[in-house]
Image (spheres, grey):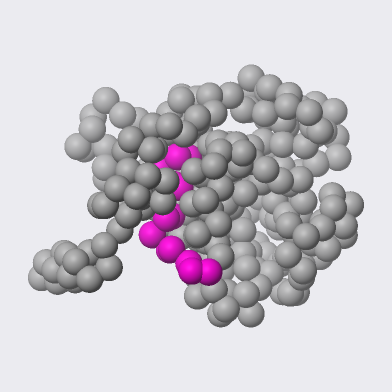
Amino acid sequence: MQTLLNTIRNFLIDIIFPKFCLNCGKEGSYLCQDCFSLIDILQRQYCPFCPYPKIVFDGKTCSPCRKSKKLAGLYCAVSYDSFIVKKMINQFKYKPYIKELSKPLASLIVVHLINLNKLSNFAESILIPVPLHKKKLKQRGFNQAEEIEKELLKLLNPGEARSSPKRSIPKISILNNVLTKIKQTPAQVELKKEQREKNIKGVFVCQKPELVKGKKIFLIDDIFTTGSTMEECARVLKKAGAQEVWGIAVARG
């Protein structure tokens, strides 16, 4: 009954507020299939912290950077230089907010993982969104990283495997509100690299260390730029006992 009501509700919403592709204007969705196919989805992984693009074939943070960093590696679907992706993320994060863009953005990540043949790496792992401060969350109404996380869980849900037996979909879970942001900070986009690291230091807390202890964690966010935010989150989670912390982002700036 609830499924039927949701279907009817969505049908009525689509009639009253039709969706149009943000790139070509075609009616039906915020990103049509033709425009999705125009996006260059990455087929390689790069060290998250090297100042120049350094391919890492094992997907891990390179050996020199690993000496001082806690983030084990990064999955990043596309470059933020893509006009279509930049427009989607801007509409996703800034007014007017389009919350449903979490679906195509999560789909870009999944295609990236399939390109890398890395779906199996998520077996028995946990997804955690990079948190917003409560004031920012109240202002926006949702955490964009958490919305992407929810869509990723749907796309990678083991239950989906029955309809596609040739596709190996790992068993994963999510943990929201375990990693929290306790201090409100200026937007990272306005700061330089050194300022970003100082700005984000000590602003995250792991509320329930027992839930992450010994676990493989994947941090979810929309954009990865200098890596200051994810690295600080990884530091906190590793201190709480996480076995390994990786990053997942839609775009790399």
For the residue pair 186 and 150, the one nearer the viewer reads as 186
Q: Residue at x 29, y 48 (%)?
A: 26
**Res 54 quadrant in image:** top right
Q: Is residue 92 magenta?
A: no
Left or right position of 206 against 112: right
Residue pushed farthest top?
A: 57
Figure quadrant of the C terminus: top right
Count the numbered circles shown.
Answer: 0
Residue 65 position within the rendered picture, expressed as x and y whole percent measured from the top left: 82, 33
The answer to whether any part of residue 123 appears in the image is no
Q: Residue at x 21, y 37 (%)?
A: 162
Q: Main secondary structure of the magenta part?
A: helix
* Residue 206 drawn above or below residue 75: below
Q: Residue at x 10, y 70 (%)?
A: 1
Left or right position of 168 against 56: left
Q: Is residue 101 magenta?
A: yes
For the residue pair 226 and 179, the one nearer the viewer reads as 226
Residue 114 position within the rendered picture, expressed as x and y whole percent measured from the top left: 43, 29
Residue 233 position within the rendered picture, expressed as x and y whole percent measured from the top left: 71, 55
* Residue 86 drawn above or below residue 44: below
Residue 23 position within the rendered picture, expressed as x and y whole percent measured from the top left: 42, 46
Q: Which residues are magenta?
A: 95-109
The answer to whether any part of residue 116 appears in the image is yes
Residue pushed farthest front?
A: 25
Q: Residue at x 50, y 31 (%)?
A: 41
* Residue 187 drawn above or below residue 174: below
